[in-house]
Structures are given as structure tokens and as C-alpha cells.
Amino acid sequence: MITKPKGTKDIYGIEAKKWQYVSKVIDEVMEKYNYDFIRTPVFESSELFHRGVGQTTDIVTKETYDFTDRGGRNMTLRPEGTAGVVRSYIENKMYGNDNKPTKLYYNMPMYRYERPQKGRLRELTQFGMEILGTDDPMSDAEIISLAVNIYKILGLKQIKVNINSLGDEISRNNYRNALIKYFRPHINELCEDCHERLEKNPLRIIDCKVDKDKEVMKMAPKTIDYLNEESKQRFEKVKEYLEVMGIDYAVDPTVVRGLDYYNHTVFEIEAKVEGFGAQNVIGGGGRYNYMVEQLEGPKTAAIGFASGFDRLMLALEKENIDILVNNSVDLFLLYVSEDEKKYAAYLLNDLRMHGFIVETDYLNRNLKSQFKQADRLNSKFTIVLNDNDLKNNEVKIKNNATKEVEMVSLDALIYYLDENLTEEVCDCNLHDHGCNCEK
Ligand code: HAM
């Protein structure tokens, strides 16, 4: 038997319905925040990630899926979404659009050759968003609040937002140098990976999972102490806006992020629910004011966030959040004769085009088994098509909840179903997703 590759998942059945539901909620919220959907290629030239994500990051040095195509070009399956979005922003000259800033979101699979474990996959899905073309601290707060609000609307309660600032380029470089100076004499106390990180990417020592509890880490320099005045003030503004928006957060100097492109605000959102496992960061992001220029676009400030879809689904499961999935059909059509079956084919098509979920039998079952199938599908109504009724231009329809049976004229069938199937809901678009209205 051929099995799926390590670190990948089949999403099907109820789980697939839950995924679709969560994706729909994300689409609805993003629409409210006025973000446009973007889809970029699964593979891009390898150079994009080397230059965009950074040559020294774990992702680029150890985790990319690289291949040479038949034309001899070096290609990489995208390990994350931001570099591709920035490439597209530059290539399609979105910066020339008067409608600024550019607000984009995506929901797509990424590929990282990581050691698979719970919450850590090789094909992972991320939904994410980017604002390009503004350095306003309010946009930092918007991205963080948007991420939090999506989680809240979905029902998550046990999350924690950790924020930090790496400051501008000067502050970040000063901090980097301070870390090298501090850790060099302590290098033998650190893990193998941190030996390599010391010269290449010392910021990553700070969030090393292996060394995190060691004494040497406790005394390490803190980002906050290396921010210049301008960066400090900027960070204060971001915090003020978050407070105005009512977003709870904690300042955590160990949040430095694994990708090279960040400056100023960085943040991560953790799932705090019991039993989640070690990979409990369900999303992270930050400001990247230099990436557009590094990829040969015009100077453009930007900030973004991405959430692991798989980890989000795990968090929802661990918090026991009931996701509403439709596991019923509106109507099941039963038939015996070929003429009745033909009429079923006509009605199926017609009613589906009017927006109803209609099913019938495709296996030439006898009537008893067709009823069983209608039950399995939790059909709200059933119609047993009957040649005599059809001659009289009517059908017998049964409401399976109340067990009531009525004769309905074929001309009035759509009206009847409309009247009896539409539930009254409030005007609030978030009604299904946990709004607080009374209905
Ligand atoms: P990241 O922190 O590398 O950031 O990934 C974002 C989220 O994707 C993580 O917090 C985690 O939930 C999920 N994730 C990452 N790797 C895996 C994996 N192997 N399996 C399952 N889930 C995973 C970025 O990717 C940035 N592009 C975020 C960003 C957008 N920054 C600015 N704009």
C-alpha cells in the first residue's frame, strides 16, 4: 500500500467540514477588516527565500524542500507566505496603487522539512495577513488584534499574546553584538545548535528550547535595553493602541522570532490549554520594514502575521469548542419506478439550483433501504415520489422532525421548502460564530 509522506495529513470527513467552517470564519473576518485575498505559487525560485527569509535561518539552512526543475532552475516549495507575497507585491507593482496601505491575506499550505511531531508537520497550512505600505504603530496593533479576534470569534479563550520589540536596524544590530559578546565566553554551556547560532544568528539563542532554563540564559542581555529612544517610543505607542483596543498582552523579551526579516514589533500567540503539547505557538508575526527593499522593491514598511491552521484546529479541539458542521440534508427524494426516478433527476437539479441540499438514491435500493439512507443523511424532509401524485401535480412531503405529512402542489414546492427550512437569525454576521446577541 502506498502511504502518505511523513509529516503530511489527509483532511477528510468531519475534520474537513470543520476546516471549511474555520476557513469561512477567517474569510468573513478578513472581509470586515478589508483585506484582499491573495494566492501565490507553491514553488518559487530558491533565491527568493534565501534573500527574503534569510540565509542563516533554520528554515532556509535545514528545512526547505529544494529541487531543480527540468529546465535546470533552482526551485523551493514555499516554507512560509510572506516572501512570496512581497515578491508578488513588487512584481505586480501593487505599491503604485493609490489605495494604500495594501492589505492582503492568504490561507495556503507551506512546506518545511522538520522532524514531525504533534503540531509540527512537513506540509503545514497557514492563514496569514500582511499590511504593506505603512509604519504607523496603529497597524502593528491592528495585526495583533486581528489575530486575537479571529481566535476569539472561533471561541478560543486560553490564549496568551507575547510581544516584544527588536527596534530599528541600529537597535537590532547593537543587541546582536551584545549577545555575541555575552555568549562567547559561555559557549560550552549551550547546545550544539546554539554553537552555530552564535555567529550566524545569535538572536535565536534567546528562544532556544533546549537551553531556555539554563542559568546563563537568565542573565542574557534583553532586547528592551538596546532599543534607541525612537524605537522605545514606537513600542510604547503600539502598547497604547493595544490597550485602547482591549487586547491583553505580556511583554516577553525572549520573543525574537525565527526568521531574519523582523524589526520593531514581534509577537507570538500561545495556546495555554492543558494537553496541547510542546508546539503551543499557534501564530506569530512582526514588522519587516526592510524586506521589500531587499527584494528590489521601493522602500516599504510592512507588518504581518501567520497562524498554523493545524495548530489552531488542535487548540479548538483541546478547548472543547463545538464547531458547527452541517451534517444534514434538506430533502431526500425516494422513488421506485423509472418515471419517478426521472422526475427525481429533474427535481434534484431544479431544487439544488434554488439553493437546497437535496439527495436521492444512486444504488437502486428498495424503498426500505432508501428510508434508511435518508435517516443516515439526517434528512429534514422526505418526498416519496409517486406516479399518481405526480399526475395530479403534487407530492407528499414529510417533515422528519415533526413527522407531519402534507400534500404540496409542485408549483408551490420551492415556496414550501423556503418557508419551512429558513431559520430566523439575527442580522449580525457573526451570529453563527458566537456573537452575543439574544436570538
Ligand atoms: P512562523 O513563526 O515561522 O512565521 O510560522 C507561523 C506559524 O505557523 C507558527 O506560529 C506555527 O503556528 C505554524 N507553524 C510553523 N511551522 C509549523 C510546522 N512545521 N507545523 C505546523 N505548524 C507550523 C511565519 O511563517 C511568518 N511568515 C509569519 C509572518 C507573516 N510574519 C510576518 N508576516
Image (cartoon, rainbow, N blue to C red):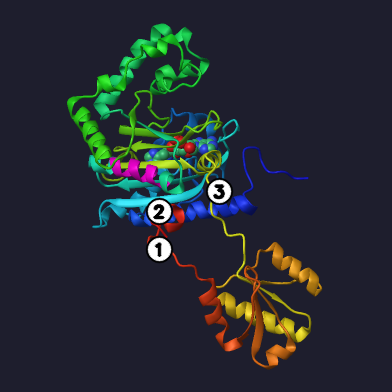
The chief SS type of the magenta part is helix
Q: Which span of residues is magenta-colored?
A: 141-150
Q: Amino acid at mark 1?
A: Cys
The residue that mark 2 highlights is 435
Give x and y (percent) for residue 120: 56, 35
> In which image quadrant can residue 338 be found?
bottom right
The residue that mark 1 highlights is 426
Determine the residue located farthest toward the bottom in the rendered image.
392
Disc 2, disc 1: CB below 8 Å?
A: yes
> In which image quadrant can residue 247 be found?
top left
Q: Judging from the image, what secondary structure is the residue with disc 1 in?
A: loop
Specify few, some or many for label 1: CA neighbours under 10 Å numbering under 14, 14-19, or 20 or more: few
Foreground residue, 361 or 175?
361
Disc 3, disc 1: CB below 8 Å?
A: no
The tally of labels here is 3
Give x and y (percent) for residue 219: 36, 11
Q: Quadrant of the C terminus?
A: bottom left
Foreground residue, 129 or 356?
356
Foreground residue, 367 or 161?
367
- Looking at the rendered image, the disc whose residue lies closer to the viewer, 3 or 2, is 2
The residue that mark 3 highlights is 71
Q: Judging from the image, what secondary structure is the residue with disc 2 in?
A: loop
Q: CA distance from mark 3 to mark 1?
A: 56 Å
The residue positioned 32% from the left and 41% from the top of the image is 303
